[in-house]
Image: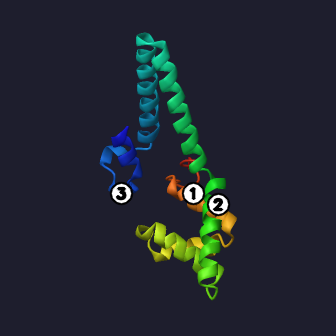
């Protein structure tokens, strides 16, 4: 699972050739679930108490991760940082503050991409939603595929 997280975190052109296939991520996700469930079944066969403890711990950790990565929580964090920077530097515009906060967090994205995001999503709510999606590896909208001509 660690290798899967590493490969999924890479940009498309930095991935190995096998990982650029459209089916790679879904197959890897399915494999992850199969391994998780088979491990839980093995634990259950060994000890019911350990199974319950393990399943509870995994459920708590999964819930925690879902809350932390949620759009609502990310918006709340961005709004908090936005207000702190607004108090420290009141001469900055909203767009400059959003740019500054994002560039601090993701300098690899580059200023051009961040400036475009600020122009496209000028409010904190919309910007936080897109920022959250990009951090989770959002790759755009699903197309309809090739049209038959």
Q: Position of residue 144 (x, y in %)?
A: 59, 48
Question: In the rendered image, which residue does mark 1 sit on?
Answer: 132
Describe residue 4's horizontal placement relative to residue 86 as left or right: left
Q: Where residue 140 is drawn, which disc sits there? A: none
Q: Which of 74 and 49 is in front in this view?
A: 49
Quadrant containing the N terminus in the rendered view: top left
Q: Nearer the viewer, residue 85 or 1?
A: 85
- Closer to the chain start, of discs 3 and 2, is 3
- Closer to the chain start, of discs 1 and 3, is 3
Q: Which of 30 and 125 is in front in this view?
A: 125
- Classify 10 Å Cα crowding around label 2: few (below 14), some (14-19), many (20 and above): many
Q: Where residue 13 is drawn, which disc sits there? A: 3
Total label count? 3
Q: Quadrant of residue 79?
A: bottom right
- From mark 1 to mark 3, how far is it between C-alphas? 22 Å
Residue lying at 46% horizontally and 29% vertically, measured from the top left: 33
Q: Where residue 75 is drawn, which disc sits there? A: 2
Residue lying furthest left: 16
Mark 1 and mark 2 in contact? Answer it, CB < 8 Å: yes
- From mark 3 to mark 2, how far is it between C-alphas? 30 Å
Residue lying at 45% horizontally and 21% vertically, measured from the top left: 40
- From mark 1 to mark 2, how far is it between C-alphas? 8 Å
42 in relation to 23, above or below: above
Residue lying at 65% horizontally and 69% vertically, measured from the top left: 121
């Amino acid at each position: 699972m660690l290798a899967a997280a590493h490969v999924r975190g890479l940009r498309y052109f930095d991935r190995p050739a096998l990982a650029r296939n459209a089916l790679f991520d879904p197959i890897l996700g399915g494999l992850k679930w199969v391994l998780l469930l088979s491990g839980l079944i093995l634990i259950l066969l060994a000890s019911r108490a350990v199974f319950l403890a393990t399943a509870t711990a995994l459920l708590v950790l999964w819930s925690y991760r879902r809350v932390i990565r949620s759009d609502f929580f990310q918006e709340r964090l961005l709004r908090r940082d936005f207000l702190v920077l607004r108090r420290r530097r009141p001469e900055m515009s909203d767009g400059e503050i959003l740019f500054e906060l994002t560039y601090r967090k993701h300098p690899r994205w580059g200023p051009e991409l961040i400036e475009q995001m600020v122009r496209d999503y000028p409010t904190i709510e919309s910007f936080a939603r897109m920022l959250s999606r990009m951090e989770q590896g959002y790759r755009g909208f699903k197309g309809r595929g090739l049209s038959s001509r």
